Image: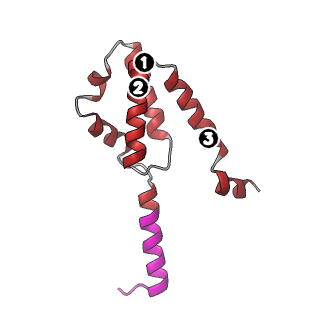
Amino acid sequence: MSKILDRLVGSLDEKREYKKIEARARALPSEYSTAYSEIKKYIFNTSGIVTMDPLKVLVDILEEAAANNKRVLEVTGPDVAAFADELVRGEHSYHEEQRNKLNATITKRLGRKE
């Protein structure tokens, strides 16, 4: 039954994890919270990630920056998009899933000629 629910609504554990990450982000001072929101939006729009790990890392980084009184741009550098791209480099993505699905389908239907 839990597999059916996971397929319909997604993993409940992932939803709980996401809510914890979001609560931590909301607790950040304004500058860091704003940076989190904007970087998260960029990541969701460009990367196709299917894991919350980069968001968790982002909150960790911003919490540490806030604790050390470092400005956001001191941590990210001036190219914030490049910083965000590095956060998701190597992460499992929706695009990767679709690529693998296409390759498997074609291989199965047409057979593999070596």
Among the two numbered marks 3 and 2 on one chain, the one whose residue lies closer to the N terminus = 3
Quarter of the picture containing the N terminus is bottom right
Please state which amino acid type lies under the numbered disc 3: Lys
In percent of width and height, residue 112 lies at 41, 84
User: Which SS type dominates the magenta stretch?
Assistant: helix
Q: Is residue 1 left or right of residue 70?
A: right
In the picture of the structure, the residue carrying the numbered disc 3 is 15
* Residue segment shown in magenta: 98-114
Residue bearing the label numbered 1: 30
Residue 99, above or below 69: below
Q: Secondary structure at mark 2?
A: helix
Q: CA distance from mark 2 to mark 1?
A: 6 Å
Identify the residue at horizontal 32%, vertical 41% (top origin): 86
- Taking the magenta stretch, the answer to whether it contains residue 106 is yes
Label 3 – label 2 distance at C-alpha: 22 Å
* Circles 2 and 1 in contact, beta carbons < 8 Å: yes
The amino acid at mark 2 is: Thr
Q: Is residue 17 left or right of residue 59?
A: right
Camera-side mark, 1 or 3: 1
Secondary structure beneath dot 1 equals: helix
| Disc 2 target residue | 34
Q: Residue at x 24, y 28 (%)?
A: 77
Q: Does 11 appear above or below 100?
A: above
